[in-house]
């Protein structure tokens, strides 16, 4: 009986020891995991899986004993400071064994937000720490990661529902907002320029976007969530933004503090365009001047963090420093301007059956405001018609400051010309100048001698213009309209703030073989671009013609102008301008593949 009791006591003692060992072993934990955008090892010729696909690389750093790895592991290399673990693309799980500890089990999707698991040709860095180097007062890591994923999901929902209140509460009151733009130099090269704004201006901009957009959709893919000392997390998100008037894609970087575990807030929000090189993507090290240190951290916690930093690499786990008194200078952004007035591309082709009417109304009488740069718009577009689109000089009729009689005279000339060419001619009608509505909200082009009180007698209605052009026996008629027909006030202040009159009008009915590409729609203004000395619409029209050397379809041209004008206007002006496309029924489904000339 005594032997049996001794066996039971021994078994209980062993179980207690095993439990103690197990509790101690569970303190081994992953303190950092992130993608290393600067390490190109995996993107170079490296290891491949059984199907010949390039592997992903996980660099595992641990200051303790030897490690072994289980999972979809193709090969492991040990260096003096880390293990290089080559994994099959798409791998979601990894088990790590260290003598004296229980296995560390990793789920890359659930633990770190990698929806597609380890990706081919990408390098990740994982830091594993023993409990003696870990800050015991840090909040539960898994719970915090769940909160971050929930925050990003709710942020997307708030955009779709246009709930500005949620956006306001997730940012700290002095958060830094950083944006990045790709700027082209005159020599054809480019650089990425950063701008910083305060959170108040950022939220005001978001609120204006909510008011101006019919619908908004954010598609977010969380690429990494990384924990840092002092209760900070950094998050990298690939974000696709789509709205009724604008779309964009890029990388979102967030620095989130968990000083209050129940209410984490964003200290830094940074946006970078999708084509930025991976090595230039921001990290916590880049934004640490804008971070805050939790004042409640005591000296013991600081000591723990120092030990922690000494046992990790500084590139993957930067130590957060207090914000300096003088912040680094942030370069102000400039629009990626190309000189469209010079070095106009010359093509040898001749389009002798294409004719252009160019109306450039800049100087008005009877107290009507001037349309800045309208004449320059027309003159430079004329040069592109000659040199780039291949129209002979005699095929292009340029009319600056056109009167009512001259407008109708040019339309009469087109009618006679197309009759003679018996359906073999193509027409380009370009207009830069004021537009205006009558009391019935019908749209009119305003000649320089037009009377704003006698529109039907002294102006050309869009319906009449489109009817005349649509009835031409022509292969194709393209209308380029750098004028807005918008619905705000027509007072002097608004006329001065925009390029043209601020008016609301009905769209004219497009007929025949006609395509209309106009500068703005709805209640928008067609703005000017002072640095380029052009209307915003015309500048991007000319820019695309220059970059493509005239070899561009109408679908490509319209999409480019819509994207670029939309981006510039909302970022630089704070208001939306959305170029609009109309195609006649005869060209539905085919107009996108047609060319301008």
Image (cartoon, helix red, strand yellow):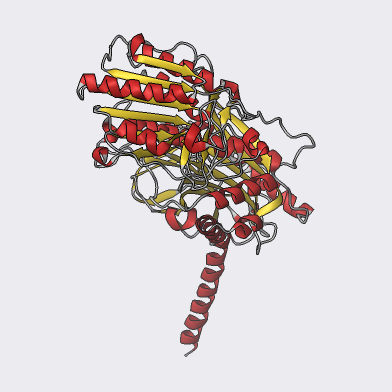
160 or 299: nearer the viewer: 160
329 left or right of 313?
A: right
In the image: residue 34, left or right of residue 258 = left
* Name of the residue lying farthest toward the bottom: 1
Count of residue discs = 0
Snapshot quadrant of residue 163: bottom right
Give the residue at x 51% y 69%.
Answer: 18
Residue at 70%, 57% in the rendered image: 259
Q: Answer above or below: position of 36 versus 382.
A: below
Q: As rendered, which of 446 and 19 lies closer to the eye? A: 446
Q: Position of residue 575 (x, y in %)?
A: 58, 41
Residue 245 x %, y %: 47, 44
Residue drawn 37% across the image and 12% down it: 386
Check the image and report above or below for 153 versus 324. Answer: below
Q: The C terminus lies in which quarter of the figure?
A: top left
User: Picture coordinates of residue 539 (x, y %)?
Assistant: 49, 25
Is residue 285 among what the camera can see?
A: no
Which of the two residues, 218 or 436, is positioned nearer the viewer here?
A: 436
Quarter of the rendering containing residue 584: top left
**Foreground residue, 495 or 83?**
495
- Horizontal and vertical percent position of residue 84: 43, 39
- In the image, 548: left or right of 315? left
**Residue 166 in view in this figure:** yes
Q: Quadrant of residue 136?
A: bottom right
Residue at position x 27%, y 13% from top? 352
């Amino acid at each position: 009986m005594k032997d049996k009791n001794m066996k039971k006591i021994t078994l209980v003692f062993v179980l207690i020891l095993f439990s103690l060992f197990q509790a101690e072993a569970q303190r081994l934990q992953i303190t950092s995991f992130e993608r290393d955008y600067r390490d190109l090892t995996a993107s170079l010729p490296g290891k491949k899986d059984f199907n010949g696909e390039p592997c992903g690389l996980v660099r595992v750093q641990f200051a303790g004993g030897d490690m072994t790895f289980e999972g979809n592991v193709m090969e492991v290399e040990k260096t003096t400071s880390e293990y290089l673990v080559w994994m099959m693309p798409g791998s979601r799980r990894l088990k790590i064994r260290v003598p004296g500890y229980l296995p560390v089990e990793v789920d890359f999707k659930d633990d770190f937000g990698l929806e597609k698991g380890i990706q081919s040709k990408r390098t990740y860095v994982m830091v594993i720490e023993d409990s003696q180097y870990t800050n015991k007062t840090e909040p539960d890591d898994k719970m915090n990661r769940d909160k971050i994923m929930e925050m990003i999901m709710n942020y997307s929902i708030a955009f779709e529902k246009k709930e500005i209140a949620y956006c306001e509460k997730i940012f700290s009151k002095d958060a830094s907002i950083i944006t990045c733009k790709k700027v082209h130099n005159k020599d054809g090269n480019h650089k990425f320029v950063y701008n910083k704004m305060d959170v108040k201006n950022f939220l005001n901009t978001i609120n204006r976007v909510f008011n101006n957009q019919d619908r908004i959709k954010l598609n977010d893919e969380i690429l990494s969530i990384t924990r840092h000392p002092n209760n900070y997390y950094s998050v990298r998100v690939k974000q696709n933004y789509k709205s009724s008037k604008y779309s964009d894609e890029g990388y979102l970087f967030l620095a989130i503090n968990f000083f209050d575990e129940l209410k984490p807030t964003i200290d830094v929000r940074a946006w970078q365009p999708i084509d930025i090189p991976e090595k230039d993507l921001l990290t916590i090290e880049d934004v640490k001047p804008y971070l805050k240190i939790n004042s409640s951290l005591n000296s013991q916690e600081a000591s723990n963090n120092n030990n922690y930093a000494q046992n990790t690499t500084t590139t993957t786990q930067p130590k957060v420093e207090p914000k300096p008194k003088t912040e680094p200078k942030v370069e102000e952004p400039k629009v990626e301007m190309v000189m469209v007035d010079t070095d106009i591309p010359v093509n040898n082709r001749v389009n002798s059956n294409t004719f252009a009417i160019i109306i450039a109304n800049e100087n008005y009488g009877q107290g009507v405001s001037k349309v800045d740069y309208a004449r320059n718009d027309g003159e430079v577009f004329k040069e592109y018609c000659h040199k780039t689109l291949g129209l002979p000089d005699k095929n292009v009729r340029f009319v600056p400051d056109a009167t009512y009689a001259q407008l109708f005279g040019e339309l009469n000339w087109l009618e006679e010309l197309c009759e003679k060419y018996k359906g073999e001619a193509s027409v380009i009608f370009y207009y830069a100048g004021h537009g205006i509505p009558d009391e019935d909200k019908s749209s009119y082009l305003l000649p320089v001698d037009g009377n704003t009180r006698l529109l039907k007698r002294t102006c050309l209605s869009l319906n009449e213009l489109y009817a005349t052009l649509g009835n031409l026996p022509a292969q194709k008629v393209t209308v380029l309209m750098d004028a807005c027909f918008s619905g705000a006030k027509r007072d002097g202040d608004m006329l001065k703030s925009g390029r043209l009159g601020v008016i609301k009008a009905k769209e004219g009915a497009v007929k025949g073989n006609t395509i209309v590409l106009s500068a703005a729609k709805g209640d928008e203004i067609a703005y000017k671009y002072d640095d380029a000395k052009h209307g915003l619409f015309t500048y991007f029209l000319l820019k695309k013609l220059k970059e493509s050397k005239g070899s561009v379809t109408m679908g490509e041209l319209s999409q480019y102008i819509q994207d670029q004008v939309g981006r510039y206007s909302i970022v630089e002006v704070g208001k939306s301008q959305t170029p609009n496309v109309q195609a006649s029924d005869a060209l539905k489904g085919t107009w996108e593949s047609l060319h301008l000339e």
